[in-house]
Amino acid sequence: MSVIPPPSSERSAIESDAARFTPQDASAPFSVLVVEDQPSMRTALVRELHQAGVSEVLEAENGRAALALFRSRRPDLVLLDIRLPGEDGYWVARQLRETERGEWTPIIFLSGLDNDLDVWRGIEAGGDDYLVKPVKPIVLVAKLRAMRRLLDMRRRLVTLSAELHLANQKLNEMVELDSLTNLVNRRGMDRMLHAEIAAARREGKPLTLMLCDLDHFKQFNDTYGHVQGDECLKHVGRLLREVCVRPRDVAARYGGEEFALILPNTPRSGAMTFARALGQMLKSLKVRPPNAPGELQLTLSGGITTCIPDEHTSAETMLMRADEALYAAKSQGRNRFFSFEMQMDTIEQRQL
């Protein structure tokens, strides 16, 4: 069966319509960098691109000029001649790909010869397509449309990936948040402690971990009820958020009435000073349940461990050390912080 071609007048209409490049988003500008050393050929390409509706056309006659324009203007598409004075188009394509660092700009090679080897070398150098000179307008517009579709698709995927990353980040924050105190929960604390140990080991800086326990909290709950107990925990949670003023300081609810503080780049003396300041601030925190005869003074016992992590340091060993120091603080009368590294507590330090 033979196919009858359309009349010449109809072919002209089709070609006229096809010779117009219209981006999917008409409001979005589309720029093309033309890298061609022959002025007449470059002028013809620029004219065809403008007639096709490209909003901005950049011109370069050699590879060095093309790289400079690419870095400063970031075009949406590159038309790159293979034969250039000095470095050839293959070299230019490789430099463009190294400049992008994870981004992607379509590169279409131009050549006066329809050579399979040129096509192969162009794709290997980072090119995406190939045009034979002199370039036919209808073919040029078809390539522009194809590359624009690919570019738009990639941008949508990048946007979607960014939105998914943000959604995952927010979900992780929700999963790692204690709903009662709005502090980091145990899961989040474990992750952050592992990360801070690795960072301190890498940087060679001290890391401090504190475990704190509200003194006589069971008696408070038994006397005033769990609702008032929850209010008490909320008060302490707000206080701990206030004392963690540096960006990487972390206050967490370790469980029940126990709390944890991760203090990066905090030496032993600084840890003890921090603990004393926390104790002083806690004195100003008054809790008055409705059926209490007066305001109640809350106190904390705390265990402190500080080290510059090495290959043997783990979250488990730091938590165990801090927990042992917390037990020592309770054994010595509560309402104090104890550090094995300094062999002293905040009461002793205040007496120095």
Image (cartoon, rainbow, N blue to C red):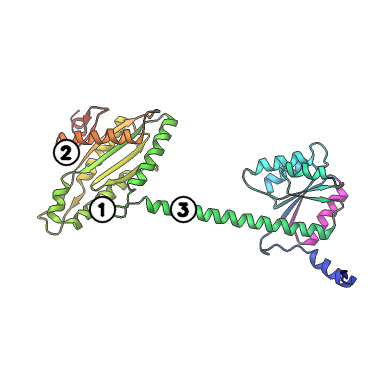
Residue at point 66% right, 61% down?
Answer: 28
Tell me which label, 2 or 1, sits earlier in the chain.
Answer: 1
Q: Amino acid at mark 3?
A: Asn
Q: Which residue is disc 2 drawn over? A: 334
Q: Secondary structure at mark 1?
A: helix
Q: Which mark's residue is nearer the viewer, 3 or 1?
A: 3
**Above or below for 5 versus 103:** below
Q: Which mark's residue is nearer the viewer, 2 or 3?
A: 3
Tell me which label, 3 or 1, sits earlier in the chain.
Answer: 3
Q: Secondary structure at mark 3?
A: helix
Q: Secondary structure at mark 2?
A: loop
Indicate the position of residue 174 as horizontal and vertical percent values.
Answer: 38, 54
Report, in whole angstroms, how far the alpha carbon at label 2 lies from the one at label 3.
41 Å
Q: How many other residues sit within 10 Å of disc 1, few (<14), some (14-19) or many (≥20)?
A: some
Q: Nearer the viewer, residue 272 or 190?
A: 190
Q: Which mark is residue 168?
A: 3
Q: Amino acid at mark 2?
A: Arg
Residue at point 55% right, 53% down?
Answer: 161
Report, in whole angstroms, how far the alpha carbon at label 3 lies from the one at label 1.
27 Å
Q: Is residue 68 magenta?
A: no
Q: Which residues are magenta?
A: 38-60
Report, in whole angstroms, how far the alpha carbon at label 2 lies from the one at label 1.
21 Å
Q: Quadrant of residue 299?
A: top left
Q: Which mark is residue 341?
A: none
Q: Quadrant of the C terminus?
A: top left
Q: Amino acid at mark 1?
A: Lys
Indicate the position of residue 341 as horizontal and vertical percent values.
Answer: 27, 27
Q: Which residue is disc 1 drawn over? A: 234
Q: Quadrant of the N terminus?
A: bottom right
